[in-house]
Each structure stands twice: as C-alpha cells, then as structure tokens.
Image: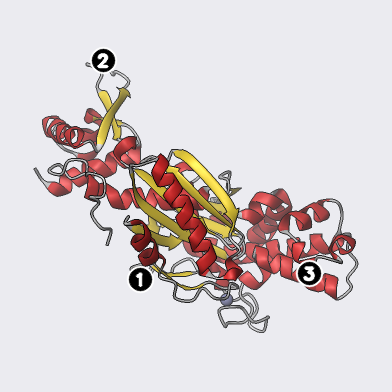
Amino acid sequence: MDESQLQDVLKRICARGQISRAGLAQELDLAPSYVSLIARELLASGSVCESGMAPSRGGRPGRLLQINPQLAHLIGVDIGTVNCRVLVTDFLGQILAFQTFRSQALKGPGPLLGLIHREIEGYRRTFPSIRAIGVAQSGVIERVTGTLLFWPKVRGWQDVPLKALLEREHGLPTIVEDSARTMAVAEQAFGQGQGLQNFVHVMVGTGLGATLFVGGELYIGSSGLAGELGHTTIDENGPLCSCGNRGCLEVYSSGWAIIHRVRTALTDGVTSTLAPALEEHPEELSLEMIVEAGKSGDRLSQTVLSEAAAHLGTALAGMVNVLNPEKIILGGPLPRVAGDTFLDPLLYFLRARAFQRSVSATQVVISQLDEKASALGVVVMLARELLGKLAGPKSPPPPRGGIPAIP
Ligand SMILES: [Zn+2]
C-alpha cells in the first residue's frame, strides 16, 4: 500500500473531522475499493474509528470515519507572563482536565517548572495514556531544539532548554511552540478561522504578534519568524523597544504598553479616577481596571486605549494591503477584555488607511475562544505531528512508553 496515499487519507479525515469512504474517494480521486482497503488498515491500527452514518444519497448509506479520539491523551502547557495553564485532552482536542495558576515568572525558571512538573505527574496518574506534551511559550523560541532563547520583559529566562527539561523529567516527547502561534492554530481548528484559506490572527496580550494562514496552511516564513507584527516600526524616533529597535508597535499597542503608559501618567500626576486606588499599590494596575475606568468616563484610560487601537489599526492597514486576507481575528487578553472599546477605534483607522477594495473584503472580529486557546492550539499541533508516526498501518497502537520521538 502506498504510504503517501495512506497519509493523504489520514490528513483528509483529520481536516474534515468526519468523512465517508465515498467522500474520501471523491475528494482524493481514488478508487472506492482502494479507499475501503486503506480504511480497513487504519481501523485495524486503531488510528481511525467509525462514527455514525453518512447522509444517504439514494444508495446504501456508509459509515463515517474519524480520527480515533482515544488514540492518545495529550498535555498542553501554556506558559504566559502572568498565568500558567495546563490541560489534558483526547487526541481531537476535547478538554478532559484543566488547571491554571500564577506563573510568577520573575522568580526564574526553577519554581515555575517545578509546579508544571508536579501538575503533569498528577495528570499522568489520572490519565495513564498521556503520550506527549506540547508547550506554548511566549518569547523567542528555537523550534528545533525547543529552547526559549529570550523572553522579553521577563529576566532570567535566557536559553532555557524547555523541551530537553520536560523530556528528561517525564520521558514523553515534547514540542515547544510560540504561544501567539498556537492560539491562532486553536482559532483555525475550533474558532472563527475554521474553513478559511487566507486569514490573519493577531494576539494582543503582554506582547503582540500576528500569525498568517495562506491557502489554509500556517505560514511561518523562511526562518520561522513570520508574523512579528509587534516589532513593526510605527515611529522611527519613538521609545526604545525590548528588541533594541525604536518605536515598535508593541511599545504602543500591547497590553504591557497600555499598563506602562497609564502607570507613567499616574506617576506624573495626570488626573485619573484610577489614581486613588493605586496610590499604595501601583503594581496592581491591570488591563481590566483600565478598561473599566475608560467605560466609566476616565479620560486617561480612554486616551491610552484609543491610541493603542489607532496604532494597531494603522499597522493592520499595511497588513491588509499586503495580504488581502478574508478575515482578521483579534485574540488574547486585550481584545477579550476591552471588546468594542478597542475594536471601534481600531476599525476607524484600519478603514481610513487601507485600500478600500481590499479592506471591504476583510472581516475583523474578536476571538470567542477563552484563556485555554494557546494550550489547546499546541495540543492540535502535537496531534498533527504525532498522527503520521502513531498511525502507520504496519504499526499497532503503541504500547505505553513506546512513543516514537518527535524530531
Ligand atoms: Zn521591537
């Protein structure tokens, strides 16, 4: 049996969710009898299962095929600047367990990794068929080695070999991916990116990053660094950015920038309804507080939020002109918390500055996924990587501990 055709069938089942043998034959231009043969192999290996009946078109109704959700359980870890999230899913991303706790990343990698190890150990006792770990990490990642090279605004995390540390501790294959990118993959799998060919996901949290999908595929660029929208120059003479450049978008429009600008203004004595509450504990200032104050009429909060939205709208106008996407999805804490307060000024500047014909074809929406999106997205990437390795027709479902390494 042709291995590449078998992989094509698996990929198509994975992409469609559920599909009949007749549907596979039609979409892949293969003989129905050959598809039946492949399906028998895949069913025998345990990598796919049958799930209900296809709607009948006059002939005998066929059973639908889908990837077997019990093929393996997977762990997703999202290491964020403020919170860390750990979840367990089946092979199709159905969440079975979830935990969140404060990252306290400024204490360095030791304490946080200790907490993550303990969570994973606990989950492995409850779900013995956990087969692999995916880590979504903010910062700059070296993908092949799974090393966090640099985490902007968080000291003490240079060159942390996350993949090696987790694999040594748990003996499970591990991948490490950029968390803005994994959030976008979750949007494509479960959110408003489903079925789209060309779209952009923009994550606005502590940092700011874009993820591009072209022809339905994730586009990562020649060095894997595509989508660094946050480090687009907005003002050549602007303030220094953590990347070393001046006037980057991230300095104006990220969640960190908004908090920093409001805090600096308060320190400088600018009038604001936020001032009395923060006099004693300025470190408690959060995006939620700024958005709430803005909605209640606080001029400082309104100004900082609308300027952040205006700069992002201007940067996205350039992106619309270059890429002409079907949709821009705004994800991450800031759009989730601020909603239309942020979206309305952003749209005004986007529409004012982009080509009208291009921008009129682009829908701009706020993600409806919650804080689990990044951890869920890395699980989707993990399942895609494992699928080919676990699901060969000659290899039965692997015994516990017998997972092939992920390169
Ligand atoms: Zn920068």
Q: Earlier in the sequence, mark 1 or mark 3?
A: 1
Quarter holding ligand 1 = bottom right
> Circle 2: is it few (<14), some (14-19), or many (20+) Cα within 10 Å?
few
How far apart marks 1 and 3 lie (CA) works out to: 39 Å
The image quarter containing residue 252 is bottom right
Q: Is residue 243 above or below residue 362?
A: below
Q: Which residue is mark 2?
A: 58
- Looking at the rendered image, the disc whose residue lies closer to the viewer, 1 or 3, is 3
Q: Which residue is mark 1?
A: 222
**Amino acid identity at mark 3:** Arg
- Looking at the rendered image, the disc whose residue lies closer to the viewer, 2 or 3, is 3
Q: Does residue 215 show up?
A: no
> Circle 1: is it few (<14), some (14-19), or many (20+) Cα within 10 Å?
few
Name the residue at 24% across, 49% down: 388
Specify whether tag 1 is near ligand 1 (CB below 8 Å). Answer: no
Q: Is 252 in front, or is 337?
A: 337
**Amino acid identity at mark 1:** Ser
Relative horizontal placement of residue 26, taking residue 87 as reference (left or right): left
- Looking at the rendered image, the disc whose residue lies closer to the viewer, 1 or 2, is 1
How far apart marks 1 and 2 lie (CA) works out to: 49 Å
**Amino acid identity at mark 2:** Gly
Relative horizontal placement of residue 293, taking residue 27 as reference (left or right): right
How far apart marks 2 and 3 lie (CA) works out to: 68 Å
Relative horizontal placement of residue 347, taking residue 158 as reference (left or right): right
Q: Which residue is mark 3?
A: 263
User: How far across and down, in percent of the image, does residue 58 sit?
Assistant: 26, 15
